[in-house]
Structure formats: C-alpha cells, structure tokens
Amino acid sequence: MDQRIIEFINALRAQGVRISLAESKDAFEAIDEMGAQEKDTFRISLRATLIKNSDDIPHFEELFPLFFQTSQPPFNNASQDLTPEQAQMIAQALRQFTEQLRRMLQKLVQGRPLTPEELNQLDRLVNMDDVNDMRFQNWKLRQMEQALRFKEVQQALQEMMEMLREMGMDQEKVEELQEQLQANQQAMEEQLKQHIGQKILENMLQQNRQERIDNLYNRPFQNLTDQDMRILHKEVRRLAAILRTRLALRLKRARTGQLDVKATLRTNLKYGNIPIEIRHKDHTLKPKIVVLCDISTSMRHCSELMLSLLYAIQDQISKTHAFSFIDRLEYVSPFFEGRQPDEAISEILQRMPSGHYNTDLGMCLENLHHNFLDTLDHHSTFIVVGDARNNYNDPRLDIFKDLSRRSRGTIWLNPESPPLWGTGDSDMLKYMPFCKRAFQVNNLTQRAEAIDQLLIQTSIG
Amino acid sequence: MDVNHQFRSPAELKTALGQQQYIASNEIATILYLSQQLGKPLLAEGPAGVGKTELAKALSGATGRELIRLQCYEGLDETKALYEWEYAKQLLYTQLLRDKLQETFSASLSLKDAADRLAAEEDVFFSMRFLLQRPLLKAILSDLPTVLLIDEIDRADAEFEAFLLEVLSDFQVSVPELGTLSAVHRPLVVLTSNNTRELSEALKRRCLYLFIDYPSLEQELAVVRLKVPELAPKLARQAVELVHRLRSLDLRKSPSISETLDWAKALVTLNAHQLDDTTLETTLSVLLKHESDLQRARRKLFSSPHISQN
C-alpha cells in the first residue's frame, strides 16, 4: 500500500502538482490516523494533505481512481442460463456475421473481458507509447473503440436480437439478453478506459519532469507548445512568488533609514515628545505600470507570459494598466479584476483570435495617446512588449516620444536578438532612443531578470 | 462541553457541528478531524460566502472553546497581530512611581551604582504587565484551549505570511525582552482565504487544505431549512433552485449561501407565497450586488421562464 501511495505522489508530481516531502509525510500520518479501509475517507485524507491548490484538485480526482480502484468492471456471462435450444438459436444467428464481428459478439455473450494480448495489440495500433498526458485518455479510447468496431458491433447486436426474435425466442428472454450484452459492452469500454489510464500513467512516470522544466525556462517563446505553456504558467506563478518576496524585502529595507523628524515629533506628542516611536522617511514607491503587449501570432506566447507574470506580482505594484494590440488597441485590465490571471488571459486571447492581421503599432500608440493618456503620469513606467515589426506602417515616433516623456521611464522588451533589431520592417532602432532600457527577452530566464531589474529601478529612487 | 474534549471520530465531529447549526459534509468533518489529530492548521479556501468563517465559529461552539479572531488586511503587521509594548502605560507608571524611584536612587553613592540599581528594576517595566496581547499571542498564551481564526489571510502581505510560519509550525513566539513564549495549549487553527492571490508554498505546506465550493442543491436546501425554518418548504426549494440557476450564469459576483439565507429571510418578512415576477423584481437586489449582474439576471429570468440548467 505504501508503495502505491508513493507511486501516486510521483504521478501527481509528473502532472505538475508540487508536493513536498513534508506533505507526503503528512499524507502517511493522515492515513495512519484514518485508516485506508473506507475509500472516501482515504481519498479525503490524501487530498487534504497533498493538494494545496484548487486548480490541482481535478488532477487528483483523475488520478486517484487509476491508482486505488481495485475492482474490475463487472462482466456477466449471458450464456450460462440458456436452454440448449436458445444457445442453438444464438449460434445460428452468430453465423450470419463476419469473422471479426462474430468474435466480438461471442465475447459479449460469454462475458469475457479483453485479454492482455488483445490489449497489447490495441496499444500498438493506436501508438499508446507516445501518449503521456491524461487529456488524451478519451481520444485514445475512441480510437480503440474504432479499432474494435464498437459501432458496428452495436448494430450487429440489434440485428442479432431481431433475428432471435424471428427465430421465435420469447420476447422477455431477448430483452434480458440484450440488456446483458449492452452491460457487457459498457464494462468492456470501462476496461479499455482503465487500461489506457494505466498506460498513460506508466508513460508519464517514465519521463523526467525536472529536466523538462529547466529546458522550458530556456526555450524560446515561439517554440512552445500548448502543453508547455500550461506548465510554464504554473512556473510563472512560482517565479512571481520569488520575485514578490525579494521585492517586499527590498521595500521594507528602503522604509528604514533616514529619520523623518517631522513625523517622529508628531507621533510622539502623546508621550510628551519623548521620541519613543521613531519614524523614517519613506523612500519606497510602488511602481505603477502601463504595459502595451503585442499579441499578434508571432508574439502571442511572449505577451501571454508577460501578462500573467505581471498580474501575479500585482500586490507589489500599485497600479497596472494593460493594453494589448494587433491592428487595434484593446484595454485589457478589466479582464483581470477578480479573476485568476490564466482565465483572464485566455479570455483576452479569445477576443482577439490569432490570424492574419496587419500589426500597426503606430496607430495603436495614437489610440493610446488619444483615449488613455491619463493612465500615464510621472509615477508610471511604460513597458512595451513587442518585436517592433510594424509592417512598414508609420511608427509615430512623435507620439512615442511624448508618451515616454510623460512617463517615469520607458522599457522595451523584445523577443528578437539585438542584431536583428532594425532589419527588415523592424522599427526597433527608431524607438530605441526614447527608451530608458531595452531588453531581449526570448525565454523565461531572461524575462525574470528583466522584471527584477525593472522593479529595482522603479521601486527605489 | 469540556474544552479539553477530543473528538473520537469524524462522525462525532459532524454531529457536534450539526448541533451548532452548521451542516458539514463528510469531507469537511473528516478534514477538521484530521486537523485536530495531526495538530495542523486548516486552510479553508473557496468563493466568498460559502461558510468558511462560519465553520470556525461552529467549531468553537462545538468544542466550547473561545474563538479568537484575527482579521487580516493589507498592512497588517506584528504589532497588530502579535503583541505590542504599551508605551503610554509604561510612561505613566514611570511618572507615578517617580518618588519611589527617587528613593531607590537616593541611597546610591555613584552613578554606576544607580545604573545597576535601575537595571535590577528593569524587569518591572518589561514584563507581561506592559505587554499588550494581540490575537495571536492571546491564542498561544490562553490558559484554556482556544480556536484561532485567521480570516482572509490572502489580504495580508507576503511578509506577514512568512511571519505566521513560526507561529503556526511551532506555536511559539519570541519576544526579545522576555524570551520565547510557548503555547500552553495548542489552539485549533483555521485559516480562510478567498483565493484573491496565491499564498506562499511554505504556508500551504504547513496546513491541511480544504476547498469549500458552492453546495449542491440538496445541501443548500438543508441549510435554508435549518436557518430559516419559517419559509414554506416548496418556496424554499424554488428559491434555492433559482439561486443555482443564477450561479450558472456568467455573473461578476455569484450569490453565496449567506446571500441565499438573506434572501430567504427577506421572502419570509415580505410574506411571499410564491416566486412571481413582482416578488423577484423587488428582492433580487438582495442576491445580486452589481447593477450589471442585476440587469443580466432580469433579462435571463424574465424573458424566458424556463432556462436550462447549464
């Protein structure tokens, strides 16, 4: 049992759930306390100790039955209580079908589950070895059912019943038989599903997760798959937590330092001006950020991660205004109100589906200048995430200059490497003189560094 | 009930909570029981108004222990949560005891001697007498076992979370002037969070996790029956069904259980016999607190009376 729990924890980790040693220890203590006899209590004990994030609960619920379900789906043998004549009739009816269908129907009549060899054969048919994600479970199930020709079997079942009726088997018996066979078919489906789940699990456990994450950190944004993005979103949250503590500490240190005489005198009036509570000058300034993200197809992943990182550290930033653009500007901050960043981002991306657009930063800058100029003041930092590839549209440098003059500083995050800046339709070099800093951010490591730098500059000054 | 009583099974705990008018699911009872057995804090997360705070109150009632509540907010720090020296009182005492102090010093021959004498009396001024106990310290030092509720921890800063770690894992607090103060009795700790921000891994690691979601129709109906028994059963069912339908809409803020209860009470007060359009029109604002939500709900509810559940 212990071994099984450890395997289960490993499988959860492979799904991207973070479980520490202390937590697995807690799980064992909880099981000692509650016992493992009652399945529901057992499940709740494990869940309360291992899962600390509501997003991870579905993973848990998905994996739990795969590990701790001992019962094989019930097959019942329909051929047991048949009279010889009835058996005869069925045999006769079966003869009408092709070889493969006959075998399947016979299996159903006798209530035999699929043998391991048959399952192995199916695995090879649908390439089970390459699958290592639970989301493919249903898809693979359909494929296997197709390989077993479930639909035709279903039809054949109907036909067979019809035939039996014609042959004069009594109605009640036919219906009973039909029910049993259908139940058997469902049991077979369940068996397949369990088998696929087990198989995916084995595959998942084999791959080394840690290695993947490290690779992901350094992989360029445009090469990320959707699944990578899912993992990365989780990592971004973790990264944000680290950044946040670092930042909070910095702010705290900045808060103690130079004595604020006026405030100290004022607070100590109640003690007869004996300086008991010392007040310091507050040097901190929580940065205000206005971010403009290019979400055209080439920049999508990059901007998505930027937004999710930014909103994950929101409590360290006094105000964030986010805009996204392709060929028009969209104010996206309202989407983040009271929502998890991932949800908000997927909604934004839905509003501006990818496709062929004419990226036009110039016009978007003009739009920003015209409608949202009040978001920018001398406290706010203006961040642009984009490749500055403007499709030869007017870059509107005059507006960019004005925006950057109004803000505390302008920072450009560009996923392209510096030698490419200014080549082709890239206006990067034209925008550069108005930026305080420009970073190349092509992967998460660079991104984290850039944000950290940025917060140092904006928060203490 | 005896405050030192330990529950012997989840079922017993569930019954005890039931006596406090709190309908706990098996899950809640099991996890609470585990929290008691393992001595670990319980972190309850979920949408606003599903009864997270109520759970701590019910637990306090069920165990007969005092409930000590710490409401978190942005900027909450140690002096508000743990302890503070009562400067004003110290100052007052020094002023009033001036004569006595003078007496102590009058016999001293040198400055050094006077300073030594003063140092000997130092303990008087840094003693528990002048320590203003805030909720956390109160929970730790209480002579009787308590229930400590740390409400809406997600509103506090990350620094405060880090500071809670010491308290929650060892149940001890170090005060520089006095040394380490350890808990007399381990309090039962319940933390609640509305999930507005990610809590740190370290804090989560030390807690058992309980996610409370909106209840099922039957569960919610049971709650309404228990808390507002005056409402006619048929009307109660209709009302709860409507609330569930509202939750399935895409609203800015879905109605919570507490709002369902408020609404049920409103229906009783208004002496409503059925949920007709006029009753709905006048009372819907009890359930929905945003104008845009109200409008959307009106459109959905009044345009077609039969909307599918999804």
Image: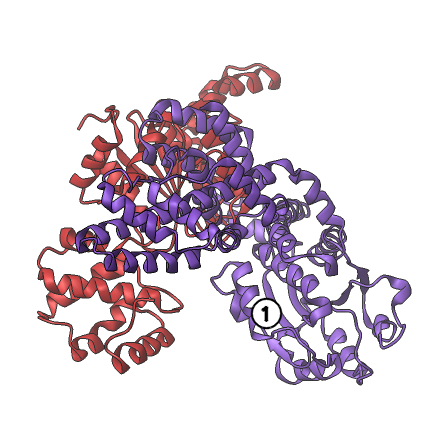
Chain colours: A purple, B red
Q: In which quarter of the image is the C terminus of chain B?
A: bottom left
Q: Which of A259 and A229 is in front in this view?
A: A229
Dot 1 surroundings within 10 Å: few (below 14), some, or many (20 or more)? some
- Left or right, A174 with respect to B159, comes to left
User: Which residue does the image show at 26% across and 37% down from the upper left?
Assistant: A80
Left or right, residue A116 beside residue A313 = left
Q: Where is residue B22 in the image (x, y as percent from the top left)?
A: 21, 44
In the rendered view of the protein, which quadrant contains the N terminus of chain B?
Answer: top left
Front residue of A331/A411: it is: A331
Q: Position of residue A110 (x, y in %)?
A: 34, 41
Amino acid type of the residue tagged 1 in the rendering: Leu
Q: How many labels does the image show?
A: 1
In this view, B124 is above or below B81: above
Q: Residue B188, percent across and down?
A: 34, 32
What is the chain identity of the residue bearing mark 1? A
Q: Can residue B217 be seen in this view?
A: yes
Which quadrant of the structure image shows residue A32?
Answer: top left
For numbered disc 1, what is the local secondary structure? helix
A295 versus B237 height, above or below: below
| Lateral position of residue B101 relative to residue A122, left or right | left
Compared across the picture, whether A172 is left or right of A372 comes to left
Task: Tell me residue A271's x, y (percent).
Answer: 48, 43
Residue B71 seen from this side:
no
Q: Disc 1 designates what residue?
A: A349
Viewer-side residue, A207 vs A218: A207
Instruction: Look at the picture and state if A400 lies above or below B153.
Output: below
Q: In this view, does A225 lie above or below A246?
A: below
Query: Residue visible at 66% across and 76% down?
Result: A355
